[in-house]
Image (tube, rainbow, N blue to C red):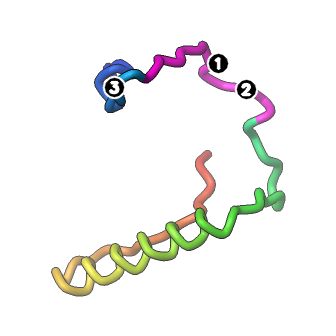
Amino acid sequence: MGGSVSNMVTRASGGVDVVFRAPRWSERWELEDDVTMPETDPHLLATRLLMDVFVAWIARHRRDAKAGSNLALR
């Protein structure tokens, strides 16, 4: 990654910077098999929109590809 937070945000005039340390990993972030995390409605709608965009792009450009979401990383 190599970027800094200051390179990834746009500062509003008169705003403040909020900086905090976060661990690289935590047991609390892991879900056991067959355990799901609820999604908010805006998150679900955004995910569906992105899936529709990806599926349309794949079809339009005749790519040998598959779009997916909510995939577990191992």
Say which quadrant the N terminus sits in: top left
Question: Could you tell me how far apart the alpha carbons at marks 3 and 1 are, in whole angstroms?
Answer: 30 Å
Type of amino acid under label 2: Ser
Which residue is pictured at 77% across the width and 57% down the height? 37
Which residue is pictured at 32% across the width and 74% down the height? 65
* Proximity of marks 1 and 2: CB atoms separated by less than 8 Å: yes
Residue numbers of the magenta segment: 15-28
SS at mark 1 in the image = loop
| Vertical relation: 28 (above or below) 38 | above
Relative side of 67 to 74, left or right: left
Mark 3 or mark 2, which has the lower sequence index? 3
Q: Which residue is mark 3?
A: 13
Q: Is residue 16 magenta?
A: yes
Locate residue 55, reporting x and y percent.
Answer: 35, 80
Question: Could you tell me how far apart the alpha carbons at marks 3 and 2 are, in whole angstroms?
Answer: 35 Å
The 10 Å Cα crowd at callout 1, few under 14, some 14 to 19, many 20 or more, is few
Which residue is pictured at 80% across the width and 33% down the height? 28
Type of amino acid under label 1: Pro
Front residue of 69 and 65: 69
Q: Nearer the viewer, mark 3 or mark 2?
A: 3
What's the mark number on residue 26?
2
Locate residue 49, reporting x and y percent.
Answer: 44, 75
SS at mark 2 in the image = loop
Front residue of 38 and 20: 20
Q: Which residue is mark 1?
A: 23
Locate residue 68, reporting x and y percent.
Answer: 48, 70
Which residue is pictured at 83% across the width and 58% down the height? 35
Relative side of 21 to 17, left or right: right
Q: Quadrant of residue 52?
A: bottom left
**Main secondary-structure element of the magenta-colored stretch:** loop
Mark 3 or mark 1, which has the lower sequence index? 3
